Structures are given as structure tokens and as C-alpha cells.
Image (tube, rainbow, N blue to C red):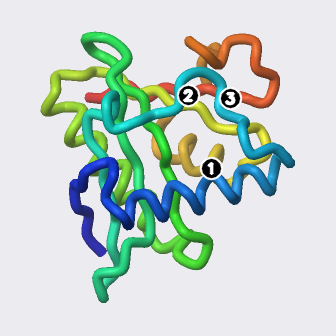
Amino acid sequence: MYTEDVPWDAPEAEALRGAQRVEIAERYGDPDTEPGVAPSGDDIAVFVLVRNEDGTAIGCGGLRQLDEVTGEVKRMYVVPESRGSGAADAIVEALEVHARKRGWTHLRLETGDRLASAIAFYRRRGFERIQNFGPYVGVDYSLCFELELT
């Protein structure tokens, strides 16, 4: 398993993000559950794919800069059949490296209250629950987390 930085509009990246949006829409019964401005190639600092041993892209994640020292994890996703394989850890580790190279000291993220496995994963990775920030303030189904990079 290995990670690779790719452009936001890379076909495999688009396919994985599309699969993520479909899964979230199925869980919430709504195709548009994203508060605020959706990420785009204009505001994502880096986008990472994780590939399995045969080179198939099985997960993704990106970073958007929030301020001088804080980045936000966006579009974190691993295909269902590869969950529990370490793919999500590989993505977060790659994103942490990129964040540190940019001088960021904190990573934030938002996830949904119906995504129990994601919540457990982020907590295991050291992310702590914080008050909802930015566009997530007042959104009942949003849970926000932050990791202090050391």
C-alpha cells in the first residue's frame, strides 16, 4: 500500500469522491449534506490517493488551508472493501506530512454523526472533539475534530 499526490481533477480522485458522496447521500437521505463551500481544485492544497499492491486507488483525502497554521481534512474516503486495511491511516499520515511541510500546527475536520466508524478512526488517530467551526456551526449532524501536530 502506498500514497500518491494527484491533482484534484485526476479521474481516480473524482471517482473516489463521487463514491463518497453517494455513500453519504445514502446514509443521510440527501445528496447535499455539505455545509459551506464544497472543496475544489482552487482551494485544496494537496490531494492524496492510497493505492493497494496492484496499484488500484482505494482511498483519498485532501487538505484545505483554513488559516496560517490550520488545515482542514476534506473528502477523506476509503472504499468499503478496503476499510480496516490501513488505507485510512496511510492517507492521514501522508496528509500530516504535507501539513507539517506547510508549517501547519493543527488539522481540523468535520464528519457526520451517522459515520460511527469514521468517528472511531479519527479518535484513534488522536483527533479530539471540538466545537463546530466555520460553516459547521449550528449544524446538528456535524461533529468537528482537531489534531495538534507535534
In the rendered structure, find residue 10 and report the number of the disc placed on it: none
**Cα gap from disc 2 to disc 3, whole angstroms:** 7 Å
Mark 3, secondary structure of its residue:
strand
Q: Amino acid at mark 3?
A: Leu
Q: Amino acid at mark 1?
A: Ala
Name, please, the residue furthest toward the bottom. Answer: 54
Reading the image, the residue beneath label 2 is 145
Reading the image, the residue beneath label 1 is 118
Q: Earlier in the sequence, mark 3 or mark 1?
A: 1
Q: Which of the 4 quarters of the picture holds residue 98? A: top left
Q: Is residue 32 left or right of residue 20?
A: right
Q: Earlier in the sequence, mark 2 or mark 1?
A: 1
**Cα gap from disc 2 to disc 1, whole angstroms:** 11 Å
In the rendered structure, find residue 143 and report the number of the disc placed on it: 3
Q: Nearer the viewer, residue 98 or 60?
A: 60
Q: Amino acid at mark 2?
A: Phe
Name, please, the residue furthest toward the left. Answer: 101
Circles 2 and 3 in contact, beta carbons < 8 Å: yes
In the displayed structure, would residue 75 be above or below residue 85? above
